[in-house]
Amino acid sequence: MTPGGPGYRRMSFALFLAGVATFALLYSTQALLPLISGEFGAPASEASWTVAAATGGLALFVLPMSALSERFGRRTVMTASLAVAVTVGLLAPFAPSLGALVALRALQGAALAGLPASAQAYLAEEVRPKALVTAIGLFVAGNSVGGMSGRIITGWVAQEWGWRVAVGAIGLLAVLCAAAFRLLLPAPRHFRAGSLRPRVLAGAVRDHLANPLLRRLYAIGALFMTVFGGVYTVIGYRLTEPPFSLPQGLIGSIFLVYLVGTASASTAGRLVGRLGRRGALYLAGATTAAGLLLSLAASMPLVVGGLVLITAGFFAGHTVASSAVGKTAAHGRAQASGLYQSAYYIGSSAGSTVGALAFRAQGWSGTVGVGLVAVLGVAAITLLGSRAARRAPATA
């Protein structure tokens, strides 16, 4: 498929909705952490496990789910994953304790593991290579819209009716997205069923991990998500404290900056066309770092400006890295994408946990410090890629 061709719009909108449902469910508790802390008497470092457990569950199960997608088809696995995830999402509001909520969130993350890798593999098979970055950008844009709408909805609903009703509202939103996704997504035309034999799957994973470019892309995805997971897990706590002292509804509205991520993800293809992959990654990292530093200010407009830059840099970097994985993998694309998603969500879990611990120890400056170290890692890995390209232009 190509932009403007038959089925492309239906496919793009269906995967956009899948992205909305995935991020809305995956991060449904992130904007609600201060309220969850209050109800269960838990500090930020404990309540943050409602986020880290979901992303950790996804990271652990993305490879097994990608293997199932190689055997049973991308659309089948994505549909089943969404069905289980939305069911758990409707049960989560009834969790009797923080431990039960964390367990449900881990199960939900494991279910959602069938979405990201399968979606990227579907696109790599069904979309022409020149349009792949743009197509994946639309899926990532759906992620950003889901993350934004989920947090805004939960913020305002929770202010009136509490966090449990807010989480239930996200579950209902995801049900609608899942149903529309299944109706709209075209049947795959280029999928060829693979093997579920462990030796074959292990061989594909081994081949991907032996590829230096793929290893660098996996590390870059993890580091970008470390920044993003840490910042957005902790920002709610910061904004409830002086000098800001914002109500829950306004804190949820801060996530309107995700619209910037929607735009930056959608235009990443043009950015790569002008600067090349590594140039785009350098720019994304520099933008993220500038946002982290700006967010240290005690002025609300400057904090929002910092979040805008962090969000734009993250979504651009993620889109560039994830689309490069699909182009680089010559076989076992679901495993290649699965490894990327696993690294990406390990980064999210690490960012949520370490960012919250740093906030507890050093305040917002501690969380920013964690993010800056991760961005430096992105720059260092990209520099290694530039040097490798000079030595072996065809493979780096």
Image (spheres, rainbow, N blue to C red):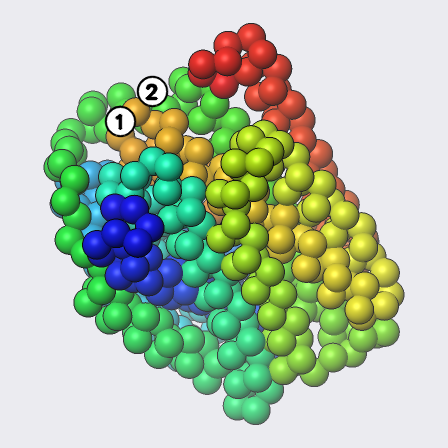
Amino acid type at mark 2 = Asp
In the image: residue 85, left or right of residue 29: left
Residue carrying label 2 = 207
Horizontal and vertical percent position of residue 382 = 61, 27
* The furthest residue to the front: 4
Residue 248 image point, x, y percent:
65, 80
Q: Residues within 10 Å of mark 1 (few under 14, many from 20)?
A: few
Residue type of the residue flagged with mark 1? His
Q: Which mark is residue 104?
A: none
Residue corresponding to mark 1: 331
Residue 49 image point, x, y percent: 54, 59
Q: Give residue 364's position: percent from left, percent from top.
A: 78, 57
* Contact (Cβ within 8 Å) of mark 1 with mark 2: yes
The residue that appears at 61% across and 75% down in the rendered structure is 252
- Residue 136 drawn above or below residue 173: above
Tag 2's secondary structure? helix
Crowding at dot 2, Cα within 10 Å, few <14 / some 14-19 / many 20+, comes out as some
Q: Secondary structure at mark 1?
A: loop
Mark sitting earlier along the chain (1/2): 2
Judge from the rendering whether residue 188 lies leftward or rightward of residue 8; answer left or right: left
* Nearer the camera: disc 1 or disc 2: 1
Q: Which residue sits at x=60%, y=33%?
A: 275
Q: In 3D space, how far apart are the residues under numbered discs 1 and 2 (Cα atoms)?
A: 9 Å
